[in-house]
Amino acid sequence: MKLRQVISVVLLIVLGTVAPNLVFAQQSVSGDMKRPNIVLVLADDLGFTDISPFGSEINTPNIAKLAEEGLSFTNYHTAGSCAPARAMLLTGVDSHRNGVPNIPEALPPELTVYENYQGVLSQNAVTLASMLQANGYHTYMTGKWHLGHTPELLPSARGFDRTIAMADTGADNWEQRAYLPIYEQANWYADGAQHNLPDDFYSSEYFIDKTIEFIASNEDDDEPFFAYIPFQAVHMPVQAPREFSDKYAGVYDAGWTVMRERRRAAAIEAGVVPAESEAIVTPGTLEWESLSEEQQRHHARRMEVYAGMVDAMDMHIGRLMSYLVSIDEYDNTIFIFTSDNGAEGSNLINPQGGSPLNNWFEVVGYNSDYETLGERGSFNAIGPSNATIAASPLTYYKFHASEGGLRVPLVISGPGITRQDEFTDEFVFVTDLTPTILGLVELDDHGGNWNQSTVEPIVGSDFSNFLTNNSQQIHNANEPIGYELGGNSALFKGDYKLVINKISQNETDWHLFNIKIDPGETNDLANDRPELLSEMMADYEDYVEANNVRDMPDNYNRVGIIFRNGFN
């Protein structure tokens, strides 16, 4: 290590602000080798096949370039909702142990009496940013945070040097305004202080502008950086500059039935899903042919704007990539691209425009008119039927424990990733990303001790060796990995998945699928494999007990709780 690094580390130990095991890990990096930068890009509500490498008709050449230069995971799973996914992503700790088993807006009061059901990131969970910061990394965050908005919970207090953070579930992409009536305002922060957005704000552009600004501010030193960029794209309100949405004019006129099949065929051809895999139509999906011409036109335009928003996000990612090339840092940067959960299927826009929120729209000046859909002042959401395109060939979408809610794309490229232009169907879970990033930069994790205090240990698996062909398996076939969110549950074990959607689908029976060969969850094996079903149900009960998972109260209604909590 350089002399000033050694001095900094000694001071940090004396002050008690860094775990000693992390210091020793830093020393393991060869003296003259420049440590890699890390760019972690998180899309919001992006569906499984919404990027071109995974079979999308949406143009994402920059993400495709990262896929060509790295490894793409087609069996990566996250949480079914934003805050739990983000908390697990940034800590490697299960959501029921890191304080975020659900978004705080959806937590019923019966559960908030429990310490692990607060919906904000616990102080007993250490972030990836804190670990990297303690080892000399500059750490930056620009985008949606949603893990707490009091001073001690903002990203500026959780390991990030410089931040632009939106603290809510979502916000308008064109201006500083709330997107739902549960918020009095859109809560933005910069470096821990309340922040006012510029007049020419567009979320994807602004996040990259500020990321470049942060990186440039330390360009002259030799220290690496970690940039976490959680986009608002494509969370509702789905909005995009017209030059992007108009690129997709007419693309979705054939409707979701046709587009789902095109996506499925393209995903098979690309090697994203097995050729023999089948798909079913998500229950509740409307019949395209039953809609009026006006309704079809409006639904198609919603998807054009959605595609434009993905396209715009990709373009701005490309701007960051070009900047890193210009300062000779691109080849020394690890890129991770993924989504927090599956596509959003909430039904907040009526088939021909208008909304259940029309009264509020009139007060605040929102509209969902066809002519200006996606532009400033417009509120757009694709709805459940269009969401089946984004999730194709998977079933259901966000909030559900079905594959359409949990399985999203994951692309990793850069130094340390020798497998290039490949797909893998190896199972990976969201808690695996923090230890893997640490592995790629040759740092040990905190081992359950941080600042001389006991903290939640990282439970994810480091698969950095898998990225270099040195390991052929990430999770042992006998290793159970549990999951629960809002009454919907799953357990993964080898190629199999146990799942029940008690709340989202009112199910009373567990289902069993081989998701390696049947990602569409079309062949329930519960009756054919009763011993495996019983074994995995016992594994799930062990997970519940070990992680203090609580049952949702009777008659729990997520949307009702969100609006009740918002108005209290």
Image (spheres, rainbow, N blue to C red):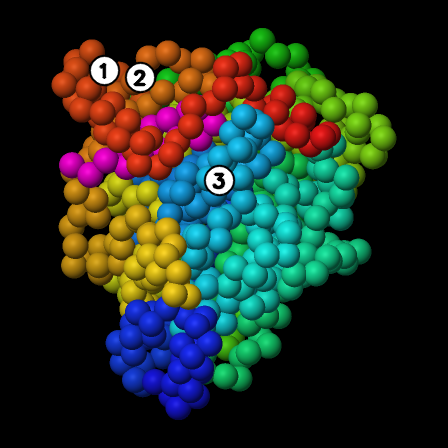
Q: Amino acid at mark 3?
A: Glu
Viewer-proximal residue, 52 or 24?
24
Q: Please report the residue visible at 22 percent of the width from the left and 55 percent of the height from the top.
A: 466
Q: Quadrant of residue 127?
A: bottom left
Q: Please report the residue visible at 42 percent of the width from the left and 18 percent of the height from the top.
A: 502
Viewer-proximal residue, 159 or 440?
159
Viewer-proximal residue, 62 or 449?
449
Residue bearing the label numbered 1: 526
Residue 510 marker: 2
Q: Main secondary structure of the magenta part?
A: strand
Position of 169 with respect to 186 (left or right) is left
Q: Which segment did they paint magenta?
A: 478-492
Crowd around label 2: few <14 · some 14–19 · many ≥20 (10 Å): some
The CA distance from mark 3 to mark 1 is 35 Å
Q: Amino acid at mark 2?
A: Trp
Q: Quadrant of residue 108?
A: top right
Are dots 1 and 2 in contact, CB under 8 Å?
Answer: yes
